[in-house]
Image (spheres, coloured by chain):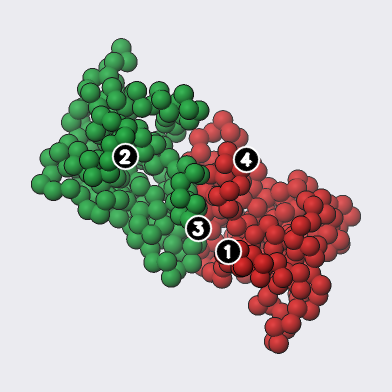
Chain colours: A green, B red
Amino acid sequence: MRVLGVDPGLTRCGLGVVDAASSRGVTLVAFGIATTPDSESVDRRLLAIAQTVGEWLDRYMPDAVAIERVFARRDVGTVSGTMQASGVAMVEAARRGIDVGLHTPTEVKAAVTGSGNAAKDQVGRMVTRLLSLSEPPRPADAADALALAICHAWRPSTLTPQGEAATPAQKAWVEASRAAAKRGRRGWVPA
Amino acid sequence: MRVLGVDPGLTRCGLGVVDAASSRGVTLVAFGIATTPDSESVDRRLLAIAQTVGEWLDRYMPDAVAIERVFARRDVGTVSGTMQASGVAMVEAARRGIDVGLHTPTEVKAAVTGSGNAAKDQVGRMVTRLLSLSEPPRPADAADALALAICHAWRPSTLTPQGEAATPAQKAWVEASRAAAKRGRRGWVPA
C-alpha cells in the first residue's frame, strides 16, 4: 500500500510518500515540504497548504493519508495553525475518498525506532535506514512525515491474521498504542 | 457590505449572513447551522463543513467572512475540532478570494451589546433587536454567527474618516479591541 504522511504546520508542512510491499519492507516514493510565509494572512497560508497537499494526492495517489494527531497541550503559540493545517489536509483526503489515519508522536516514534521516547534525530536515522537512503531526509519535517507514513503502513490491522506483531517495531507500536489508549486517547482513528 | 459570520464547530457550525448598509444599519439575509454526526470520521465531518460553507459563499456571495478566533485555552476536549473547522472555513473563503476577519468572543459581545462581558443570551437578544426579528435566531450557534457578521461589519475601519466611533457599540468595540491588544492578542486580522 502507498501512504502519504503529513506532518502538519503553517510555516512548514512536511510531506512524505512511501510504498509498503509487506509488513516489513518500505520504499521511498517522494518527500518534501510545503512552506508559507508568515507575512501572508492565515487563510491564504491554509489555502496554499490545501493546494499543495491536493497536488501531492493527485500526483502520487496514495491509498491512505497519515496525519500527526495534534494535542491542545502542545505549544500554545503554534498549536492553532498546526491544528488548522491538519484539518485542511484531512479535508483534501476526504474530498478524494482517501482514508485518513491519525497517529500520535509517541506511536510514530515507537513504530520506527521501537521506543516511544526516542529522540527526534533517532527517528530521522531510522527513517534513513528503513528507506535505505544515503542520508537523513531534510528538513526534519519531511523525515517526520515519512515516519508517519511508515507508522501507518505498519499499524496493527496490517499484522498477521492472529493479530501478532511480526517485528520488534510492530510490537513497540502495539505497546505504545495500548499505553496511549490507557491515557484516554485512541491510538489511531480509522477513517 | 455583506458579511457571512461563521461560529466554527465540528458538531454544530453556526452560519449567518447580514447586509450592512451603513455603520449603524444591518439587515438579516440568512442564518442556519451545519451539523455533522460524531459517528462519522473527523475528516468526513470537516469535508461536510467545508462543502456547506462553500455552498453558502456561492449562494450569498458575501464581501467578507467573519470567523471566531479560537484560543487554545478553550475546552481542550472540543478545541481541536473547533480550530480545524475554523481553518476549513478560512480555506473556502480564501479559495474564492473573499476577505477573512477573525474576532474574539469579547470583541463580538462588545460590538453588539456594548459590553465585552455580556451574557450569551444578551447577545442573542441584541442580535434580535439589531436585525428587527420577532424572536432570537435559533440555535444559539446561528445567533453567534450573526453577531460575528455584525461585529465585522462594524469593525474600526468602517468608522468615520476621523477614526471616531459613531455609536456606543462601536466605542465598546474599539475599547475591547484595545484591551485584547494589551493582552498580546491582535483584535482582528485583515485578510
Q: Identify the chain of the residue marked 3, using the numbered disc in the image.
A: B
Q: Which residue is mark 4?
A: B11
Whole-angstrom CA distance, mark 3 to mark 4, is 19 Å
Q: Identify the chain of the residue marked 2, using the numbered disc in the image.
A: A
Outermost residue toward the bottom?
A: B162
Mark drawn on residue A148: 2
The mark closer to the camera, 1 or 4, is 1
Residue B140, image x, y percentages:
75, 48
Which element type, helix, strand or loop, lies under badge 2?
A: helix
How many numbered badges does the structure rendering display?
4
Q: Which residue is mark 1?
A: B185
Outermost residue toward the top?
A: A162
| Label 4 neighbour load within 10 Å: few <14, some 14-19, many 20+ | some
Which element type, helix, strand or loop, lies under badge 1?
A: loop
Whole-angstrom CA distance, mark 1 to mark 2, is 33 Å
Q: Are marks 3 and 4 in contact (CB under 8 Å)?
A: no
